[in-house]
Image (spheres, rainbow, N blue to C red):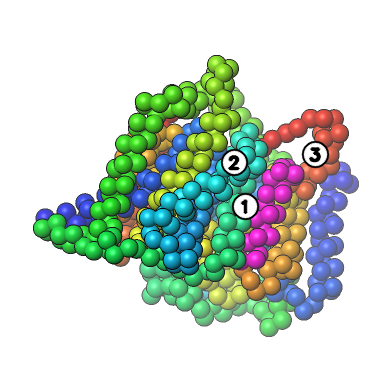
Amino acid sequence: MNLLLNIAVDGIAYGMILFMIAVGLSVTMGLMRVVNLAHGGFALIGGALAHWLGAGLGLPFGLALLLAVAGTIVIAMPLERLVYRRIYGFGELQQVLATIGLTFLMIASVNLLLGSSLLAIPLPEALSRSVDLGFRQLTAHRAAVIAVGALVILGLWALLDRTRFGIRLRAAVDNRDTASALGIDTGRIYMLTFALGAGLAALGGILGAELLPIDAYYPLRYMVLFLIVVAIGGLGSILGSFVAALAIGLIETASRYLVPDMATITFFGIVILFLALRPRGLMGRA
Amino acid sequence: MAVRFLPPLLMLLAAVAAYFLFPYNLAFLTRIVIMVVLVLSLDLVLGFAGIATLGQAAMYGAGAYAAGLFAIHVWADPVAGLVAGALAGAVLAALSGAVLMRTQGLTLIMLTIAVAQICAEIANRARGVTGGADGLRGIRPGKVLGVWEFDFIGITGYWYALAVMLLVFAVLAILGRSPFGLSLRGIHESPARMEAIGVSVYRRRLAAYTLGGGIAGIAGALTAQITQLVSLETFSFSLSAEALIMLILGGTGRLYGAVLGTVIFMAVHHVAAANDPFNWLFVIGALVLAVVFFLPAGIAHLPTSLKRLSKGGRHAGS
């Protein structure tokens, strides 16, 4: 029983992080139809900035987090304008190549500035304390991760369902050309959505640094993991990515607890089986 | 007719010239030749059949381990080792392809990466058989065709790899003109129309993927025999990505594009990488972006691209 609860808590925390990082990828893929392999790079940039601000300049965690997320957005916006906008119309393969090229450049830049070692993000006292849940000790950090993840999904739901921007975004995902013909400024929506996705990836990268440690090779190491969330959730579906991220978090945590030697193989086996049966994912559109 | 044989002939001349020009770099030249075999296999899968894959290293690694284990435990004959490597690559491609070829787009790309990662994980876990992270050691291949012994400088290795590469090139050139090759190009252009005229797209793609896997297995077997070491790196994502970059750099769908791209990429790598892999990432990242933006069809298509450019036309993507 305790084992099950442990798996549940750790799996949900892990799933929340995967969700925060991957949701932007899912939306940009659904909206711009871009196979963006460089998305994990934004989590890396966020983590690297937080490391530099927190450990290097000694800023408090909360401030470092905010500045790092803002900094990532500031980097992502011109990148969308200058690079991504040009590859929207390209074939799948060209997009894959261009974004691999970008990933390599991000890795090389982070390495040049901060080195190739582990980039630790110092946690404040309040977050490293542990909370007693009765059946186990849980660090306040992990509880905070779950809370922030829940806030993010609620916030995204409110943004998409309750605001004018959300309506326009959904219209653009459904049919780009028609939305554009109706006078919706799709270019602006692309840029804002891209920046939002990058910011969330940075947030997830920073909060998840304990589970997915940040170093220069981060985007390549976890690329498949983020792509799996998107593929299982279905392109362009926020709820799909949420369910997929939680399911993946739980399955991977469970296989680590139950079959530690075969964890990776079990995990990939389940993913491949699922995608063979449902190639469009949980809530994918045609 | 004469024009058709010109590129392969030039290639052979260049290979012979390289042998005499760089006698102290034979190991590097051999690596280029082996990479050409891998990139040719990718050209069959991606350039002919249009299957977007980032996991060709899975079959390369399977071939390398199979050939290594075969040489250690069964028979040291190199040619038999090549057959073992080809079989291993083809079997892995057929098994994984049976699932992969049902998917497309992002899912397909992601699953091909996942297959290579699973292979790396299995090789890492099965330490008793594969040597795990230390790599598979103790491969001692016998004489090639019972005549030429592998020497320390790598003369035999170079000619052996070159002969295998030319054979693969010839087979693919014939295949490209055969009805099967033409149907693959048809599937690449329009799967729906090929389906409509009665072609089983799934089976043809699976056949192409299996064949490409076999050739990638041959490339892996060559590495195992010539370097006499197989490491987990043979399954790495970087290898798949680099092979893809070489192919795109040279141009897909034309075999000599694969050769050209590999030679240029490896030469740039040799000069730029030195011993700092991170600065090399700057070069390769910029190179890839430049190719995608300015040379979308690769160097082999440069004349066509220029012609189209002068007419004011523009083409995006494959």
- Residue A68's tag is none
With respect to residue B246, does A24 lie above or below? Answer: above
Q: In terms of depth relative to the viewer, which is nearer, B120 or B163?
A: B120
| Disc 3 element | helix
| Disc 3 packing (10 Å; few <14; some 14–19; many ≥20) | many
Asked if residue B137 lies in the magenta stretch, the reply is: no
Residue bearing mark 1: A101
Q: Quadrant of residue B125?
A: bottom left
Label 3 amino acid?
Answer: Ser
Name the residue located 29 percent from the left edge and 42 percent from the top edge: A150
Q: How many marks?
A: 3
Q: Residue furthest top?
A: A182
Q: Amino acid at mark 1?
A: Gly
Chain label for disc 1? A
Give the mark toward the camera: 3 or 1.
1
Q: Main secondary structure of the magenta part?
A: helix
* Residue under numbered circle 2: A80
Question: Which of the 4 quarters of the picture holds residue B311?
Answer: top right
Task: Please report the residue visible at 57 percent of the width from the left and 21 percent of the height from the top.
Answer: A180
Tell me which label, 2 or 1, sits earlier in the chain: 2
Residue for badge 3: B305
Viewer-proximal residue among A245 and B234:
A245
